[in-house]
Image: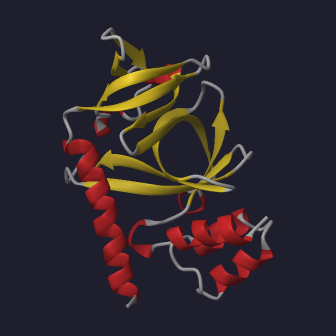
Amino acid sequence: MKIIKYILILVALALISFSIFSQNKQDAGFIITKKGDTLYGWIKDVKIEKMDRPNSKIRIQLEKGKKSKHKLKTISIIERGDEIFETFWLEKNGSVFNEKYIVMNNKGDFQLLKCISTGDLSHYIKLYIDQESGVFESIDFLKLKNSNVIIRATQGVFGLKKKKVAEYLNNCEAIVTKIKSEEVKTIFDVVSYYNNYCD
């Protein structure tokens, strides 16, 4: 049962990645700039291979027909169709198996992360193409509301980084207990439980 659930999650993430990569059309949406301006219009797809390049440009055809381009580093949020992306500058802290990232202001590594769900605990994924295999990949991240720390929440085939996630969410004893007892096993379970039962 555990293996089937894990396989279904991998398939879902692969389909998300494929849908973003394969679309070559415009969808209605908006962008919010770092200056706080909101621009509505038709937005071209976001290319996976450009998600970590701050000078990559996104094209938007404004409602009045005017077209404009904006560098990703000048944007806070992109909503395109039913997809939401947020930009972050992240400074890595810790080892490979104990990664956490500090949200910085215009320094560190630039990332455009896809928002899976938001709340007191938000779930993001980083989409990328593995350079050796050419396969779509994703990395799960968690971010507490009003925190400047984002953690990597999964480790590939090993699944949820239980110890790291429990440590990050130690303000809610109930979820720490659920993670340790494996009643909460996936990142989706963690986010749902935290947002519904933790204050």
Q: Which residue: 72% across, 77% down?
A: 176
Q: Which residue: 19% across, 34% down?
A: 24
The total number of labels drawn is: 0
Q: Quadrant of the N terminus?
A: bottom left
Q: Relative to 197, is 134 on the left or the right?
A: left
Is residue 26 something one can see in this rendering?
A: yes
Picture coordinates of residue 13 (x, y %)? Answer: 34, 61
In this view of the protein, which residue sits in the foreground, 88 or 96?
88
Which residue is farthest front?
Answer: 64
Q: Which residue: 43% across, 23% down?
A: 40
Q: Relative to 167, is 48 on the left or the right?
A: left
Q: Relative to 13, is 193 on the left or the right?
A: right
Q: Is 95 situated above or below 78?
A: below
Q: Is 30 situated above or below 99?
A: above
Picture coordinates of residue 159 (x, y %)? Answer: 46, 73
Is residue 130 something one can see in this rendering?
A: no
Q: Which residue: 33% across, 68% down?
A: 10
Picture coordinates of residue 87 (x, y %)? Answer: 52, 34
Q: Is 8 situated above or below 12?
A: below
Q: Is 29 situated above or below 83?
A: above
